Image (spheres, coloured by chain):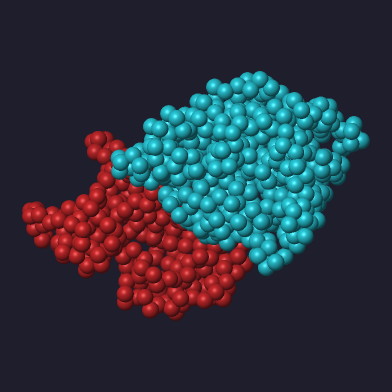
Chain colours: A red, B cyan
Amino acid sequence: MTARAVPAGGVVARGVVARILPRSAVDGPGNRAVVFLQGCDFDCLYCHNPETRALCVHCGECVPACPSGALTARPAAGPKRPFGLELRWDATRCVDCGACVAACRRDSSPKAVTMSAAEVLASLGRQRAFLSGITVSGGECGLQPAFLESLLVASRAAGLPGLVDTNGSTDYAALPALVEAAEGFMLDVKAWDEDEHRALTGASNRAAIANLRFLAAAGKLYEVRTVVVPGRFDAELTVREVSRALVDSGSAARYKLIRFRPQGVRARWRGLPVPDDDTMAALAALARAEGVREVVVV
Amino acid sequence: MSASLSVITDRSLTYQQKVAALAKVGEETVRPLSIDPETQALRDAGVVCDLFEGSAPYRPRYVVPDYERFMRQGSAFLGLEPPRDIWEATTALLVLYRHVPSITTFPVYLGDLDALLEPFVRDEAEARKAIGLFLLSIDRTLNDSFCHADIGPDATTAGRLILELSREQKNAVPNLSLKYDPDRTPDDFAILAAATALEVAKPSFANHRLFASEFEAMGLGDYAIASCYNGLSKGGGSCTLVRMNLAALSPRSKGRDDFMDRVLPDAVGRQLSYMDERVRFLVDESGFFESSFLVAEGLIRKDRFSAMFGLVGLAECANDLASRGGSGAGRFGHDAKTDALALSIVDRIASIVGSHRVGRLEANGGRYLMHAQVGIDSDRGVSPGCRVPIGEEPELVEHIIQSAPFHRYFPSGIGDVFAFEPTAKANPRQLLDIVRGGFSHGLRYLSAYAADADVVRITGYLVKRSEIARLNSGGQSLQDTTALGRNAVNNLGVLERRLRS
């Protein structure tokens, strides 16, 4: 049973949105609005937005850290509020200083909000005429499939086709309506060897590799990405096998090789090694030699 | 030292630049125009300025030949048959360029080159060689970056070759516009144009539907983009361009009401009368339209000539008046009230200009066309046309939406320039999205370049940074526009534009 934008019961799917970037030139072709959903099932060493990993539990620890009075806590009851508090974030008072997420011990953010697809699109306002489409990212957007599908359907209807930026942990073969509604997918293959992948992300890569083959064969793969961290996994193996999977399926997807950068990474992982130009060039050459149509190094 | 001797002994000028400068010195020895003292006072104060057009107009400022007709009929005066292949076509154009008059001595419009050359593109390799040499000849012999060529809106092999060769050659000349129509211009062609713009600062994007519909409605026929970004009637042009410096005008008023009710209408009226006098001399006395072979052969027609009412420094004018209003209004580009005041100033000017008729010119019923002038190199603290001052530019989309309402007033040219981070080159479709969004909001013309390009757009024209460096180190530059660009870099800070990602 797949999710529907408006299910039979008439309930509109709502999602937990970490933030919306109204315009980006680096999240797919053209200008795109990027919708970051809150919550992720991977714990990548090099995660660049760790505050989007967990859902807020309303513990209230971030409230004293806020310098602008944008965060308030009031008493609340119920199983969803184990700390007995209800946090409110006032966007109009927020100065985007990052103090709240720095204070959070749970890789979360008090600024994530629950929205419908229509509300997400309405929030884009006057930027809409300047966009090629939207990109739904995260966190991991595949963890909210009903909302993701409703957002893709609504966005496409509004003339803004949607790309899905995903770690591939969700079985997209089981979500044909979602796949149909997406313009394409940008899929991470973080490591080919499963043990190395677990060490890097805390999770298996079996679903991601299955998605690589499924989405490539379905013609829905826009881009595959691998972040290169020297010494943490066999990058040559990964690049070679990903390239072969792309070529075997006749996919026109491009392969983006991303140099690890310490900016924005949690403190304990900022010392991971950064690959040099030769390493990146050799991996790009490997992918090209395997026959990948377009290889991008960033 | 006399004016002519100082030109003759100037070691920074090439021989050709000296010849052009001496022609100006010669022209200034006669003063046949009748100018009333009040108007002359406004000229002396820098409020009304004819942009170095000279004291005795002997040719229209901007001439826009009907090159399509030239390709069909050749030229009896020049002894040219209609061209039959790509070599004859490019050679014929180069010959004609030498004989197109203008304020700069160089032609300001080189034709819709893709449409002109496409019929002769039979073998792509041969066409590439011919068009490559053609573009090279233009850059090395038409040494002025107000020389402007157009391509589009339809994709052609010739158009693609012009883009690819522009990218390879990285020359400042010609200036280049893509007439862009989302219904006619294919995405891949437009994205190639965007990628080229991010490499070599050209082409710019002209809103084809807007220009075409307006020129049709004004009875001006097909349009061309010439010089900086001037929309002009093909087969005609503009007799003169005189600009009003609004930044210099507003301090002459006691406040907003005095400006709108007395100072502005008076100055607009005097600028119109000065333009009338320049047109009178050119049309009635200079003999241009009776003696040019371009007229005799139908390559230009007097009834396609108008004249351009220019303005500059709207931002400074609006900021000045807003600050004196006591309303607490903020800066132009950031405050809705100040923007509305600026729009009302433009609207007032447009209504006075629109109700003025000059009997000598039939084009557009004798009405002049409005033009947002990009400034001259000596301007300080005067922003081009209706632009937001450099250093105060809003976020990109907000900037475009702020600017768009002004664009509809200026059929003979207005445009915004945006500088991008070099990383923008990785995603040229982004620029196309900006263009499409802007045009959907009514934007007329948009230019872009990447911050690391050698060729940069100064205000409306292109200059190579490496040529400025050559001039600064005491050498000469082939292009006369390099010196203008150097001064504008110093006076207007054009290399400090906000970088867009």
Residue B314 falls left or right of residue B257: right
In this rendered view, identify the residue nearer to me: B217 or A16. Answer: B217
Query: Does B291 sit above or below residue A15?
Result: above
Rendered residue at 49%/56% (across/down): B499
In this rendering, does residue B184 appear at all?
no
Q: Quadrant of residue B334?
A: top left
Rendered residue at 12%/56% (across/down): A73
In this rendered view, identify the residue nearer to me: A119 or B86. Answer: B86
Rendered residue at 73%/57% (across/down): B1
Query: Does B29 sit above or below residue B424?
Result: above
In this rendered view, identify the residue nearer to me: B50 or B303. Answer: B50
x, y percent for residue A21: 37, 52
x, y percent for residue B433: 51, 45
Rendered residue at 11%/60% (across/down): A82
Residue B219 falls left or right of residue A217: right
Q: Quadrant of residue B100?
A: top right
Q: Which residue is farthest right?
A: B79
x, y percent for residue B135: 76, 50
